[in-house]
Amino acid sequence: MDYAGKCLTLIGAASIQDYIFRSNDLKDNVGASQIVYSELRYLYNHPPQGCTPIYAGGGNAALLFDSQEDAKLAIQHWTFRIARDFPGLRVAVAHQPVRRHLRSAWNETREKLSESENRPPFGSELGALPFVKVCATTGLAAAGTDYGEPISAESKAKRAKREDFDRRLKECILKPAVAETFSIPKDFGKIGEEGASQIALVHADGNNIGKAFKSCSEEAKSDDEFLDGIGDLSNKLTQTETRALQNTVADLTLAGVLNWLSSTKLIDREQNNYVLPLRPIVFGGDDVTFVCHGKLGLSLATRYIRHFEEASRESFGDKTFTCCAGVLVMPQKFPFSRAYRLAEHLCANAKHRRREQGGTGSWIDFQLLLEGASGSLEGLRRILYGENFENLLGRPYKIDGDDSRSWTFFERAYRHLTGGSHRWPRSRIKQMLESIAAGTGEDAALEQAFAARGYDLPAGMSAKNCFDAFEMADFHIEIAPELTVPAGAA
């Protein structure tokens, strides 16, 4: 088919992370996520006149219009409705007339969209005025109340979509066994156990996804083949991510996990079942973001990565995708927008290490926060661990493999420290952790003294290269059918 004269339109939710994670209220977060998902899907499922949808997912959409005039008019109507009904949501749009080939127009439009997304928004937000109440979650002028709490028009629109998000969550992610066993938590306080304030924020992103879309353009022999290929790629990526998240959540029904949840009193007494210790916030593309119980963050992240690889093999066969993840274990009250940026940086850090180590496999990076902190991830680690933190930390870890940079290495050290007859007392773990972090060189002597008392380390490991396992000993629970809870971890 000849596409010359048509107009390619790409849409992206600019500053989507700021919009979704602006608030520390879970109702706002999931509602905002649902708004982004549903509005882009609306364009795909109800295309304007003269429009052929190509794909929608992951905060982006691609549409093909009969003309540039049709494209601008349709998007003008759509963005007006966005501005009217969903204050605070900023979308970026790029139009590109197809001159010769749709494939070349695609690359030009992607460059335009990137420029549009990076431009500052027009105008500025109106904060609270002197004569109005302030929204507790956004800091903007209140436009109504929710259970007596003043909320802005932005929060009001987000909260109206929360039930739609939960409905999609039940339809797409929760298998029957999960839906029967768990209640969906309504706020962050329900995810963590009583007396423990730590929750985990997990952000995972597929590797080489941008290259895959680019290769669709370069390898297609015709525009029709390009359209089919790019639509098929988008659909399969969504299926892969959805299946991976679905199977990760299903892992929580393992008998050992349920026993542990009972010990932590994560019980919904009204519904007479467990509280789901995991709450997806963003899903439906090639990346996913969820919050969970702080001690399940690493286990659920690595489970998701393995399920993603498995689902990718089922969807793509030889072109299997891997993914990287960042996990931030943090206090419940930690500012959520900052938490997301740190988790995103941790994921990017894992991707950077992956490239340095040959560009293969899935990787994970993580960080524990026990109190508030500011600045970049690098600055934060320099404050926590000193100038030579890169030599101290073993992370990021590659999920597969068996060397000191592999997740297997971390798990072996963690199991040795927290299980069996050689389990280390919490006081000795803390003493060793402080000694290593101090960098005085006394950790080797301390390691010898502890070994003489029966607190040794696995063969081939030293206290220094087990630093990550020492640090996470109280903040990690392995998920297995028969879960052995480390002393004092429940």
Image: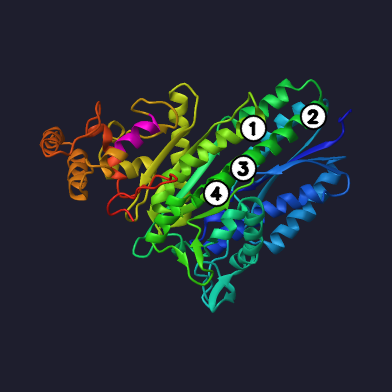
Q: Nearer the viewer, mark 3 or mark 4?
A: 4
Residue 31 counted in the magenta span: no
- Give yes or no for contact between labels 1 and 3 (Cβ–Cβ under 8 Å): yes
Tell me how far mark 4 sits from mark 2, CA to CA. 42 Å
Q: Amino acid at mark 2?
A: Leu
Q: Residues at badges 2 and 3 in contact (C-beta under 8 Å)? A: no
Instruction: Name which residue lies at 31% across and 40% down.
Output: 414
**For discs 2 and 1, the disc positioned in front in the rendered view:** 1
Q: Which SS class for mark 2?
A: helix
Q: Which mark is residue 250?
A: 4
Q: Amino acid at mark 3?
A: Arg
Dot 3: few (<14), some (14–19), or many (≥20) neighbours within 10 Å? many
**Residue type beneath disc 4:** Ala
Which residue corresponds to the image point at 54% horizontal and 59% vertical from the top-left?
A: 181
Regarding mark 3 in the picture, which secondary structure is present there?
helix
- Provide the residue designation for mark 2: 102
Majority SS type along the magenta span: helix
Judged left or right of residue 214, residue 155 is left
Separation (CA) of disc 1 from disc 3:
10 Å
Residue type at numbered disc 1: Glu
Residue under label 3, please give it: 243
Q: Residue at x 47, y 43 (%)?
A: 301
Secondary structure of the residue carrying numbered label 4 = helix
Disc 1 designates what residue?
A: 314
Which region shows up in magenta?
Answer: 406-414
Looking at the rendered image, the disc whose residue lies closer to the viewer, 4 or 2, is 4
From the viewer's side, name the closer residue of 314 and 5.
314
Is the residue 109 above or below the residue 171 in the image? above
Q: Which residue is painted at 53% across and 65% down in the image?
A: 186
